[in-house]
Image (cartoon, grey):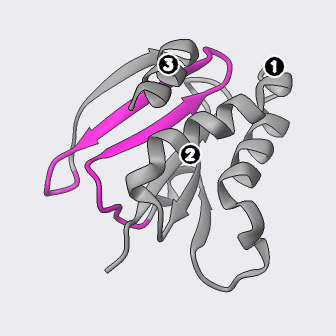
Amino acid sequence: MGDRAVFGFKATKESQPIWLYSHWGGSDQTSDLAKAIEAAAPRWNDPHYATRIAISQIVGDDWSGEFGYGISAGDDGFAHPDYDTIPVVIWSERVVVLWEYDSDEQMMRSFKMPFDLYLGMATSA
């Protein structure tokens, strides 16, 4: 058993997501994503670079490791996280949408938070 988390990144609301799966660190997903969004700030207007910067920030020095992280694109889905909330960054809107799932992996609801509110929440947690 791990501490699995999933992060999503989208250029626009309509675009297909890029999913980053993390086998460890799910309990830190809010602060890890906040640091990643902050690191990508110079490129928020360029979602391709912003996504690469954010993913690099989360993965850190583990790029050469065989285990720990996976990436999938679009509707291919993602591994099941250990948490019911999956944060999805939408760069064009500068928001994080928190998708909440039930035990049957059906999306129940989502909450949209502007970057500044999400970053503030992460630092107060």
- Magenta-highlighted residues: 79-105
Other residues around mark 1 within 10 Å, as few (<14) / some (14–19) / many (≥20): some
Image quarter of residue 50: top right
Q: Residue furthest bottom?
A: 66
Residue located 45% across and 61% down the image: 78
Q: Is residue 38 above or below residue 68?
A: above
Lateral position of residue 2 relative to residue 107, left or right:
right
Residue 114 position, x and y percent, is: 51, 13
Residue 40 position, x and y percent, is: 77, 32
User: Label 3, on which residue?
Assistant: 120
Query: Which of the two discs, 3 and 1, sits closer to the camera?
Result: 3
Question: Element under label 1?
Answer: loop
Residue 7 within the segment the image draws in magenta: no
* Mark sitting on residue 32: 2
Q: Is residue 30 above or below residue 83?
A: above
Q: At label 1, which amino acid type do we have?
A: Asn
Which of these two is toward me, 40 or 17?
40
Going from N to C along the chain, the mark reached first, 2 or 3, is 2
User: Label 1, on which residue?
Assistant: 45
Going from N to C along the chain, the mark reached first, 3 or 1, is 1
How many numbered badges does the structure rendering display?
A: 3
Residue 99 within the segment the image draws in magenta: yes
Residue located 72% across and 50% down the image: 57
Query: Which of the two discs, 2 and 1, sits closer to the camera?
Result: 2
Q: At label 3, which amino acid type do we have?
A: Gly
